[in-house]
Image (cartoon, rainbow, N blue to C red):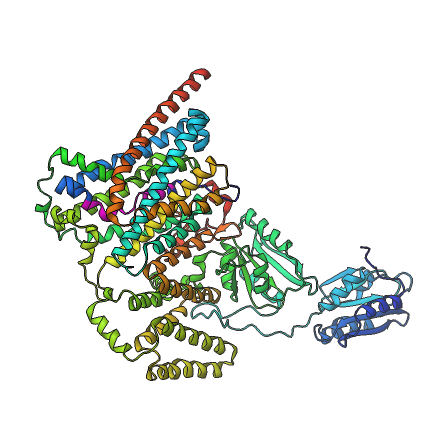
Amino acid sequence: MKAINNHITKNQYLFIIQSSMIGVGVLSLASEVSKEAHQSGWISVLIGGIYPLTCVLIGASIYKNVSYLDYFQMSKKLYGNILTYIFTLLFTVYFLFTEAFILSGFANLMIFSITQFLSPYVIMIVSIIVAFLTSRKGLTNIGRITELMFYVTFFIFLIPLYFINKGNVTNLLPLIDGIDNILKSLKGALFSYSGIEVCFFIIPFITDTKKIKSSGVIGSLITIALYTMTVLIVVSYIGWRFASKLQYPILYLVGSIELSVIANFETIIIFIWGNKIFQTLSIIHCVLSYCVSNLFKVSYKSSCYFLCLPYLVLASFFISEHKRSSIVDIIMPYFIIYTIIWMILTLLISSIKKRGIKNEGN
Amino acid sequence: MKQEILKKDIAKSIEIISSKIAYNANFVKREISIKGNINCCILYMKGISDNKYIEEIILKPLLLHIESPIEKNKISAREIARKYILSSDIEFESSIENLIYFISSGKCVILVDGATEAIVCSAKSDAYRSIDESRSEKSVLGTRESFVENLDLNIAMIQRKIQNPNLKIEKYKIGNKTKTDVVLTYIEGVIDPQVLSEIKKRINEIKTPVMLTSGILEQFIEKKTFSIFPQCKNTERPDKVVFDLLEGKAALFVAETPAALVVPAVFIEFFQSIEDYSERTILSNFSRLMRFIALVTVLILEPIYLVLLSYNPGLLPYKLILVIISSRQGIPLPPILEILAMDIAIEILREGGLRLPSPVGTTLAIVGGIVIGDAAVSAHLVSNMTLFIVAITVVSTFLIPSYEMTLSIRFLRFPLIILAQAFGFLGLLAGLFMLIVIIIDLESFGIPYFSPMAPQRIKDDLRDTMVRAPLKESLKEAVTFKLSLRRKK
């Protein structure tokens, strides 16, 4: 681990948080939530945003309670060796699945859109190589990349804005289409925020510990705003019925803009979004390698390298979007419940221990 | 190892020195006798020392202007120098090895019989190319002077522009065989001490028999030898060096090289020109923006054209497809070969033109660019559209002000073309992403290569990057090159 530089600034933390969640969700989210919540899908996305906000706030509080020890030191202090091993293993499996889902989703979309001529395995291998090369030098490089690329990928925000006055408001009415439906579609919305859990591992690497909470919150809010705005615009433009039938409604939307040099905006948005996917994959690969290197006492670089194979194998099971989304529906709820339980428990124990230490001091 | 020192017997000293500089037709030994009783010998190297200077400043006073008698046993080299030598730059040396080095470097050595020290006078010939306009970094509004092959003159050009007592000039000798003078200049108090010590450390670590140019020095002091990107900035312009020194960087000069090596250097600098600061703010920003558009054009225009032709013609608008189809009719080569063939032809022409005298170079450019291009299209080997795309790419490379960076960027389009051919848009996407990863991973003497954009310094240094703020703002002290200041922030 000596050659690896993991320190990040709080600004970089903000962008890592923002990038960790942008997976395939942004393109298919409108379809997912429209199935259950109909025109109120955007409300589910907005409510689902509580999850990343909670994660970053609780994560910051936990590490404040333990004086910013790193994840393993913190966990061992609160839970001991065996429980730390079990919890980290669960997180490792979770990240492995998340990365495999993103990777297969990316391959599925590329085949669907602009690289029909490539095998999904080729797309996955190329993406794994990119993720490996990006994450092998540690979190510092990833932090720098995310903060630089944020401005490039900012166009993802701007493209849907083109449609803001082209939609029909009646497509969004009535605003609330039954609380039950909104809650049902919350599941799909929550999955699109998966990846935020990396904050539990990277907070101790922030060099300036002031305003960690606000950086995390801003990072999450950017993604929440992007997701909500996308769903809102898609539904207002094409209506929830059509949106729920499409696999990637946002691509349909941008496909309708004609340009003089390129047929439509679809290519541009995939180009920009692909950049985001590489960032997301690299962030999760980095955290995954960090967990594996500490669990199995191997160097960070080796774990970074050796993890490429298992997650390529795992991702290959999820080729075809239908198969992938059905597996995501089965697996993800367990992981999200686990994360919620872990963070609440850790916050409580860390607060009790902190109070105990304070009392002893008095 | 024990150093051999001068003997009291002048004949013996001359014999030792002569034996060590044997078989050198330029070596001159001029024996004289002062007032008829003190033997002296003047040693120098013809060609690199100035004969006239030696005659006027050293020989003439010693032979003609000594009037009072000198007692043979009481005279010392220091006294002769003090009373009779007109040269302003004098030192004394007793080591034979050092004396030989001084003679080889153009100085004049005066041996005095009975003295164990020799007088060393600066007598280096000024027969150098005069100060001229830079050939590789031309400017319309900036100064016309550029560095020459004379190290002292190069340093003087800097000193004339920075009249600051904190301007430090340190000399190093590099190269076991060439013993080349390398000068490090920086402004104390402006340069970060950590960066300075890293520069000095790397200079001291150089182990090479030969040091001839600043390009060689660059490769010895940079950390990542196999990186495509230059980690030091080579410049011919003194005004550029002055700007850099004031920003907290150091400049290295190698003797007999008409360029300075500025360290550390970051990516964005290679796209900034000294003229940007002389022009009006909006106009200079427009020029900078054009350079970045040119950079993107060089990198992605050909790969995108290739992908659209080979894999995704459906992404092109109908009218554009018709134009491309009509231009490609009857072309037997696949797009990748068409593009690569044209690119390689242009690289060959450019490399050829570079070595030729300028009138012949211009002819070659005309023959290559117009005649060969036209012939290729007429022969149906290359389509009009491909020729147009390649030409736009080539012209775009000329907008990048730094020659070193142009070379790197020009090279980078080849891997991107290959990736685009292999994986279509995915290859291009992955290639560009990896390019950014590689740049971000680079450091120049501890300074992140992509700063001040990554890591970002929005408040401090973004005022002078892709665009520049008005001079009042953009000339404020930069934090990018100050590690200690950055940590505090």
Compared across the picture, whether B427 is left or right of B485 comes to left
Residue A82 sits above or below residue B19 on the image: above
The residue nearer to you, when weighing A246 against B131, is A246
Task: Point out the stretch of residues depicted in magenta.
Answer: A13-31
The part of the image, by quadrant, that contains residue B474 is bottom left
Q: Tell me if residue A25 is in the magenta stretch.
A: yes
Instruction: Choose between B41 and A304: the one closer to the eye.
Output: A304
The answer, for residue A40, to whether it is visible in the render is: no
Magenta residues, dominant SS class: helix
**Residue drawn 25% across and 39% down?**
A329
Whole-percent x and y of residue A40? 14, 40
Left or right: B17, with B336 as reference point? right
Quarter assignment of residue B363:
bottom left
From what the image shows, is residue B419 above or below residue B48? above
Q: How many marks?
A: 0
Where does the C terminus of chain A fall, quadrant-wise? top left
Q: Quadrant of residue A195?
A: top left
Q: Residue B382, how many percent across, how many down? A: 34, 78
